[in-house]
Amino acid sequence: MTEAVAAARRSRITPEREAELYEAVLDLLREVGYDALTMDAVAARTRSSKATLYRQWGGKAELVAKAVRHSKPGGSADEVDTGSLRGDLHALTLRSDDCEMEQNSALMRGLAMAVHGNPDLLRAFRDHLIEPEMAEFRRVLQRAIDRGEVRADNPAIDYVMHMMIGGFAARSLIDEQPPTQAFLLSYIDAVVLPALGATTS
Amino acid sequence: MTEAVAAARRSRITPEREAELYEAVLDLLREVGYDALTMDAVAARTRSSKATLYRQWGGKAELVAKAVRHSKPGGSADEVDTGSLRGDLHALTLRSDDCEMEQNSALMRGLAMAVHGNPDLLRAFRDHLIEPEMAEFRRVLQRAIDRGEVRADNPAIDYVMHMMIGGFAARSLIDEQPPTQAFLLSYIDAVVLPALGATTS
């Protein structure tokens, strides 16, 4: 489906109604998890018809991925550009407060589990969640390269998302706590910037 | 339970029988996952009594964590000490071939999912899987500090496991493939060694 067609389909409902639907999907996701979440339950909770849901979103995977995306900060309106790589990475981190980060981390973890064995969800997860985040990191890194802060051939450039996901995912396993702003800022300064050969102060 | 008591209890079965039991537990884990795995199924598959299993391992969480630990390379007999941090990290990576790494990664992912909401499993997972790996990394890093390769106050030292787990976990999400030796060696050279300020060649 092209973006234009998708926009035309989405235009049948108002942004307010769309936000309300996404909230209901996230509530259900937190309550029962991805596998047990049904389009019937979404339809009942939001007093919509299943036909409408399928017409607007194509299916459960895309609806869930877009609902999670909708709950996250970001998008072109929030473009971060502070003039330094450290400033940009810190600003991206500070867009979510600790409470949002904990909720978001629980949602992402639930989805990351469910993608195994769910090819539709894996595709939607990548298209609507991983890829937009990677695009944002690429823009931030490109500006750092253009400013001469990071060498264009630094091999760590390809691994920025791996490093960041590691900070998020390992935090709960090793430290038994959700990622916080303070932890991520410290991790960016200790790991991400030095690996990129960028200035850390 | 102290190590001595645990050893005395374990001594009632032979190492061969123990290995056989662990293999059966891993097979069941791959077939049904942690949540659906029952001690009844383990007892049936291994022709043991449930009483024996509980006496030897205390419960499902510890049995599963020890079975996974048993399948991984490592332990004091395999102590890695090549004389350089890069050599040691590469040698640790090369202990598992790509096929073992893929199987191991699937098992660890399954357990990492199941620990949420399973405090017993989280404890066993940390005690028998995360902590021994961290201890090994700490020994490798301490030798690098003693040799003057890494500064003792480098803040990335606390994040080595986060970086490594990130490489493993993000690989399947971002690159849609299991971690391979080639990927991990490149990741160590591009990310882990530069963050630690250690030499990369």
Image: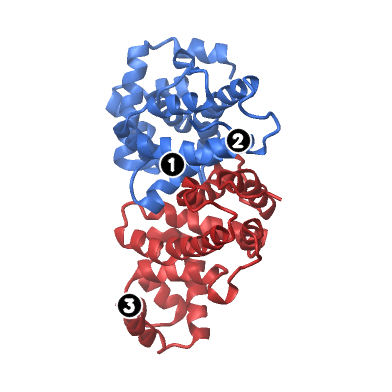
Chain colours: A blue, B red
Q: Quadrant of the N terminus of chain A?
A: top right
Label 3 sits on residue? B54
Q: Is residue A100 above or below residue B63?
A: above
Q: Is residue B88 above or below residue A101?
A: below
Residue A136: x and y, percent?
Answer: 53, 24
Label 2 sits on residue? A197
Q: Which mark is residue A168?
A: 1
Check the residue under mark 2 and report the chain it is in: A
- Residue B78, located in which quarter of the rendered image? bottom right
Check the residue under mark 3 and report the chain it is in: B
Residue at 53% in and 37% down: A192
- Residue B174, located in which quarter of the rendered image? top right
- Amino acid type of the residue that numbered disc 3 sits on in the rendered structure: Tyr
- Amino acid type of the residue that numbered disc 2 sits on in the rendered structure: Gly
Q: Is label 3 on the same chain as label 2?
A: no
* Camera-nearest residue between A66 and B169: B169
SS assignment at label 3: helix
Q: Is label 3 on the same chain as label 1?
A: no
Label 2 and label 1: CA atoms lie apart by 22 Å
Residue at 65% in and 58% down: B90
Label 1 packing within 10 angstroms: few (<14), some (14-19), many (20+): many
Label 3 packing within 10 angstroms: few (<14), some (14-19), many (20+): some
SS assignment at label 1: helix
Residue A115: x and y, percent?
Answer: 50, 42
Label 3 and label 1: CA atoms lie apart by 35 Å
Check the residue under mark 1 and report the chain it is in: A
